[in-house]
Each structure stands twice: as structure tokens, then as C-alpha cells.
């Protein structure tokens, strides 16, 4: 699946929220986008049903793709759970999707990306930098992804492969909407953001489009907040 002269990108979790906005934005930039997800995209994109926890499913889907320039590791899950309330199954789910899935996807895709001197994006979270007491497990997985970005950026710089990480703040997607019990919680969340709004998926998609472009050719190993100022705000400021 290659269009002559075009770059090819895989976006994991590209059927919803941020992933879908990233897929649309990269397509706008003239990139051929392929979605790996466990649910079908709502519109026309080449799609493989891939659970990123499953090494066999990843390898099988990748075997159909001859050229790969860009991997956007976006699929992930979020739930709030205090440490002592977290079940073993919940620990496995969060670690397997957020960490192991990104690890497996990147490990399997790298050979093809190296051939093209391409780039890898990891969608972590501003909660990989600042603690959220109601979700220590989520914060830990996202902090881990920031370190994975740095390790891979160092290791593959010699091959001309760039690896960068984006740290979204609260972004208006189905994931965030599920976490708000009511409208008042959404309003309180927006008020705590220094820029006083919840972000849109396109805010993240614009950063990804920049980081995979030639304009970002000297940028690797970075972890870039796109969070309305959340990760640089002081707890004591108000
Ligand atoms: P979303 O729930 O709208 O979309 C997530 C997508 O990932 C879905 O299409 C889902 O089917 C897919 N997915 C889930 N598990 C998968 C698996 N095992 N294999 C393949 N695909 C799978 O969520 P979103 O808000 O768009 O989140 C995208 C990423 O952004 C996640 O990594 C999330 O942690 C991160 N993030 C979100 C926010 C936010 O406020 N929305 C903030 C910071 C970081």
C-alpha cells in the first residue's frame, strides 16, 4: 500500500478523538495515513484491526505495508483510580495498552522506518510530568513513555530516525468526556487550565504535523507539552 512519492504514516488509535484528528491533519499534509485500531474509523481511511497489545496482530498488519515513514503511537486508555483501589486487571490493562502496546508497535515498525529515515511520535500526557493523585498508574505509564522517547531518540539518531513525544493537557475527546461525571466538572477542569479552556484534538494534530515535517528536522528526543500551560503552572499561584 504505497502511493508514488507520498509519505506513509500509521496512527494507532486513529478511529477516535485525537488519533482521528491526527489522521485527518496528516492526510491534509499529503501523507497516506493507515489506521491501526480495535474499532473501525468513522470515515474512509485504510484500516487494520490491530490490538496493540498483540505482537502477532501487529506483525501481520505490518506485513501488508511496504513503506513506512511515520509511526504515531497514540492509542491509550485513561481511568482514575487511587492506588489502593486499583485491581490487578486494571494494572495489566493500563500497562499493557499504554506502555507495552507502544513498545511493541515501535519495535515492530522500526525496521521499515529506518529504511526511510522516518520519525516516531509518542502521545504521552502532561500527567507524565505533573502528578494527578487520582490516577498514579496513568501518570506512571505516561512518564515511562517520556523516557522511552529519550532512549529511542538516542539510539536511532545515527540512522536518521527522529523520535519525539507530545504531552497533551485535557483535550476534548470521548476519553475525556467519559471521565467527566457532569458538565460542572468539565467547567472546573477548564478553569484550572491557565489558558482557561479544554484543548481541541486539532491542537495536538497541529503539533504532530509539525514534528513529522522537514521543519522539525533538528528536533529529536523532545517532550512537548500542548496543554494550555497545565504542566508549567504553580499549585500555589492562586
Ligand atoms: P479516545 O478514547 O477518544 O481514543 C483512543 C483510541 O484508541 C480509540 O479509537 C480506541 O479504540 C483505541 N484503542 C484503545 N485501546 C486500543 C488497543 N489495545 N489497540 C488499538 N487501539 C486501541 O482517546 P483520546 O483522548 O483520543 O486519547 C488518545 C491518546 O491521548 C491516549 O494515549 C491518551 O492517553 C492521550 N491523552 C489524552 C488526553 C485527553 O484529555 N483526551 C490527555 C492526555 C493524553
Image (cartoon, helix red, strand yellow):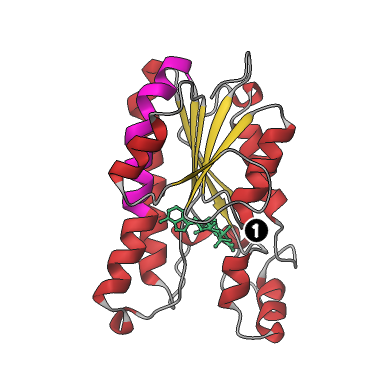
Q: In the rendered structure, which segment of residues is drawn in magenta?
A: 99-117
Compare residues 158 and 130 and report the one nearer the observer: 158
Picture quadrant of residue 56: top left
Secondary structure beneath dot 1 equals: loop
Compare residues 146 and 79 and report the one nearer the observer: 79
Q: Is the CB–ligand 1 distance for label 1 below 8 Å?
A: no
Residue located 64% across and 63% down the image: 173
Badge 1 is on which residue? 229
Residue located 68% across and 64% down the image: 172
Label 1: how many Cα within 10 Å (few below 14, some 14–19, many 20+):
some
Residue 17, how many percent across, how many down?
Answer: 63, 57
Q: Main secondary structure of the magenta part?
A: helix
Residue 90, how many percent across, how many down?
Answer: 32, 72
Residue located 60% across and 60% down the image: 169
Q: Does 109 appear above or below 205?
A: above
Q: Quadrant of the C terminus?
A: bottom right
Is residue 226 among the parts visible in the rendering? no
Residue located 60% across and 69% down the image: 176
For residue 82, side relative to residue 198 (left or right): left
Amino acid at each position: 500500500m504505497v502511493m508514488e512519492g507520498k509519505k506513509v504514516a500509521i496512527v494507532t488509535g486513529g478511529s477516535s478523538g485525537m488519533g482521528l484528528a491526527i489522521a485527518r491533519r496528516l492526510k491534509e499534509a499529503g501523507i497516506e495515513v493507515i489506521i491501526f485500531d480495535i474499532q473501525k474509523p468513522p470515515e474512509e481511511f485504510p484500516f487494520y484491526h490491530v490490538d496493540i497489545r498483540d505482537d502477532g496482530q501487529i506483525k501481520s498488519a505490518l506485513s501488508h505495508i511496504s513503506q513506512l515513514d511515520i509511526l504515531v503511537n497514540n492509542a491509550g486508555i485513561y481511568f482514575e483510580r487511587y492506588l489502593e483501589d486499583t485491581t490487578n486487571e486494571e494494572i495489566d490493562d493500563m500497562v499493557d495498552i499504554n506502555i507495552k502496546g507502544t513498545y511493541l508497535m515501535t519495535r515492530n515498525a522500526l525496521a521499515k522506518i529506518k529504511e526511510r529515515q522516518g520519525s516516531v511520535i509518542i502521545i504521552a500526557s502532561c500527567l507524565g510530568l505533573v502528578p494527578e493523585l487520582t490516577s498514579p498508574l496513568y501518570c506512571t505509564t505516561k512518564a515511562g513513555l517520556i523516557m522511552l522517547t529519550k532512549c529511542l531518540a538516542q539510539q536511532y539518531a545515527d540512522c536518521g530516525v527522529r523520535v519525539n513525544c507530545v504531552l497533551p493537557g485535557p483535550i476534548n475527546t470521548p476519553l475525556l468526556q467519559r471521565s467527566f461525571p457532569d458538565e460542572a466538572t468539565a467547567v472546573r477542569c477548564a478553569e484550572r487550565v491557565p489558558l482557561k479552556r479544554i484543548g481541541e484534538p486539532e491542537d495536538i494534530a497541529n503539533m504532530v504535523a509539525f514534528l513529522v515535517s522537514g521543519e522539525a528536522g533538528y528536533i529529536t528526543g523532545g517532550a512537548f507539552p500542548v496543554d494550555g500551560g497545565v504542566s508549567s503552572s504553580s499549585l500555589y499561584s492562586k
